[in-house]
Amino acid sequence: MHPELDRLATELWEFGLENSPSSATLLGDHRFDHLIEDLSEEREAVQRTQLFEFANRAEAIDPDTLNHTERVTRTVMIGDCRKNVAVIDSQITEMRSDQLVSPHATMLHVAPQWMFPEPDYAEAYIERLHAIPGALDQAFDRYRSAIRKGRPPARIRRLPTRPGSRRSCDSGMRHGPPSAPPSICGPSTMSCSEVAV
């Protein structure tokens, strides 16, 4: 393989493992078993800079010096790095608060899949467990940051439906929890009071 492309691919792979220690464990790389993902804005800013640099370095490699497979690798690396920069720029981390992709839900899905075949790996895992509350605190800090910016995380809401419809959602909570916004469903024929945002 082209030496610079090979070096860059290795660095990018290591970058991915270091920044996603949970994924590293799932892949059988136990160097990061003691760590959990860093969700802070500061770390994300560092990641953005590194991804941008990876993309620029890949673009600087002359595609005419590469064979077909290497050109594909270069193109994928550039695209993946640029995409991840765009994801960071979208500030989606501040919006991931639902029951599927939020940090608190993801940890519950992923943790049972972690395997620690050696006692040393299991010892490192104990350190990871102790780090989880801090990671969740970082996630909540990101949600608070979004609220301060006027971008509150989406809240799961029930949509208004008419009684008798296939998806009537009348559950006795006509006005939702105390933190729900005022009802927008005027007529009593509507069974729910909240709207999805």
Image (cartoon, rainbow, N blue to C red):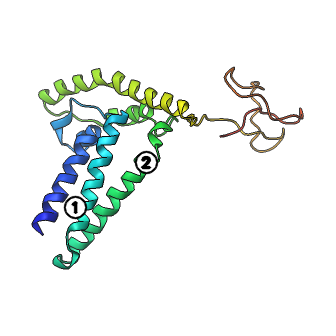
**Measuring 52% from the left and 36% from the top, which residue is drawn there?**
98
How packed mark 2 is, by other alpha carbons closer than 10 Å (few <14, some 14-19, many 20 or more), is: few
Answer above or below: position of 87 versus 77.
Answer: above
Q: Secondary structure at mark 2?
A: helix
Q: Is residue 182 left or right of residue 118?
A: right
Tag of residue 57: 1
Q: Which residue is mark 2?
A: 89
Residue contact between numbered discs 1 and 2, judged by CB atoms under 8 Å: no
Estimate the x, y position of residue 87 in percent, counting from the top left. 42, 50
Estimate the x, y position of residue 133 in percent, counting from the top left. 36, 22
Quadrant showing the N terminus: bottom left
In this view, the residue farthest toward the left is 3
Q: Amino acid at mark 1?
A: Arg
Q: CA distance from mark 1 to mark 2?
A: 20 Å
Residue 52 seen in the current view: yes
- Counting residues from the N terminus, which is met first, the one under dot 1 or under dot 2? 1
Could you say which quadrant of the image residue 163 lies in?
top right
Q: Is residue 181 left or right of residue 30?
A: right
Q: Nearer the viewer, residue 20 or 30?
A: 20
Answer above or below: position of 179 versus 18.
Answer: above
Q: Secondary structure at mark 1?
A: helix
Q: Is residue 112 left or right of residue 154?
A: left
**Measuring 77% from the left and 33% from the top, which residue is drawn there?**
192
Estimate the x, y position of residue 36 in percent, counting from the top left. 28, 32
Q: Amino acid at mark 2?
A: Asp
**Measuring 23% from the left and 39% from the top, which residue is drawn there?**
25
